Amino acid sequence: MPSACRRKVFWRCRAHAEHPTQMAETSAGFIAKSYDPRMSRFAIPIGRSVIALILLGVLAAACLLFGLPWISYRFTHSISRDAFVESHLVNLSPQVAGNVVEVYVQEQEQVKKGQLLAIVDPSIYRREVELAAAKLEVSKAALAQSQADLVLLQQQVPQQVAAAEAKLAAMRENQAKSVAALEMISQTVDDAVTAAQKSVDAAQAALTFASDDERRFTALYTDGSATQRRMQEATKTHDVAKAEQKRTDALLSEAQANRKQVEIAKQELAAAKSAVAQAQADVELAKTGDAQILVAERQVDQRT
């Protein structure tokens, strides 16, 4: 216990012992007029409570003075082993290369977020912007052209395919007609040639028979075995048979000549087949427009 406190307690106790009803002034400055048992019980604790309250007040003031900033700092800052060190003085450098043409702050001057500090020469980048803008206009023009080409292809290709398919259908129909015509002409010519050949054979047989009768009756007439009239009938029959042979020969020649129509029909059929093949190729070529449409769509997508 400190010496002052010991003296105070000593004098206090001595005063109680010598003067039960009255206390003398102690070295600590306390004066009692009369003795009070409660005073002797609570005198020392009350003094200590005041000192404790003073110390608590000082401690609370210190906590408020130093604790509140620390708490505020802890709630607004993070502590980590892997982080950036906060500093109020930093070195600056631009993100792009160039000459600094204007400076708006001084060294060691306090600045705020978003404040303009300096300007880098914008002439170089302005030219790049103008060049990029020109390229953008060219790209827009190319995009517009590609879109126009795409629309034109989307309109023309279906029409071209439809026209090619219609032409192919017509050529196939023409080919079918040519096949039918060839078959009909071939059959007709063959029938005509066969009939003419049979007529020729019959006329030749009749002529042979008539020639034999003519020679026989002529010989009999010469011998007197046959009449003149019978000889003349045989001669007339021979002449008729000979004329019939000439007629049938002419019919046979005409029928055989009609075989040229078969050849012509074959040529027409070959031409029809060639036209069908060409029409089929035109259809395939028209359908390639679908691939052109896909290419045009990719170009538009790339330029969009």
Image: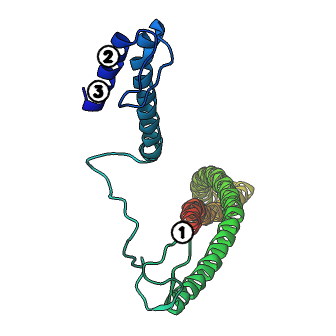
Q: Position of residue 201 (x, y in %)?
A: 57, 52
Q: Position of residue 237 (x, y in %)?
A: 70, 56
Q: Please name the residue shown 33% across and 57% down the image.
A: 84
Q: CA distance from mark 3 to mark 1?
A: 64 Å
Circle 3 — which element?
helix
Q: Are marks 2 and 1 in contact (CB under 8 Å)?
A: no
Q: CA distance from mark 2 to mark 3?
A: 10 Å
Instruction: Give neighbour class at mark 3: few <14, some 14-19, many 20+ (Cα, 10 Å).
Output: some
Query: In the picture, residue 178 is in which quadrant?
Result: bottom right
Q: Which mark is residue 7?
A: 3
Residue of label 1: 112
Nearest the camera: 20 or 290?
20
The quarter of the picture where the C terminus appears is: bottom right
The quarter of the picture where the N terminus appears is: top left
Image vertical order of residue 149 relative to residue 273, above or below:
below
Q: Closer to the camera: disc 2 or disc 3? A: 2
182 left or right of 25? right
Q: Closer to the camera: disc 3 or disc 1? A: 3
Q: Please name the residue shown 71% across and 54% down the image.
A: 230
Q: Closer to the camera: disc 2 or disc 1? A: 2
Image vertical order of residue 221 relative to residue 53, above or below:
below
Residue of label 2: 14
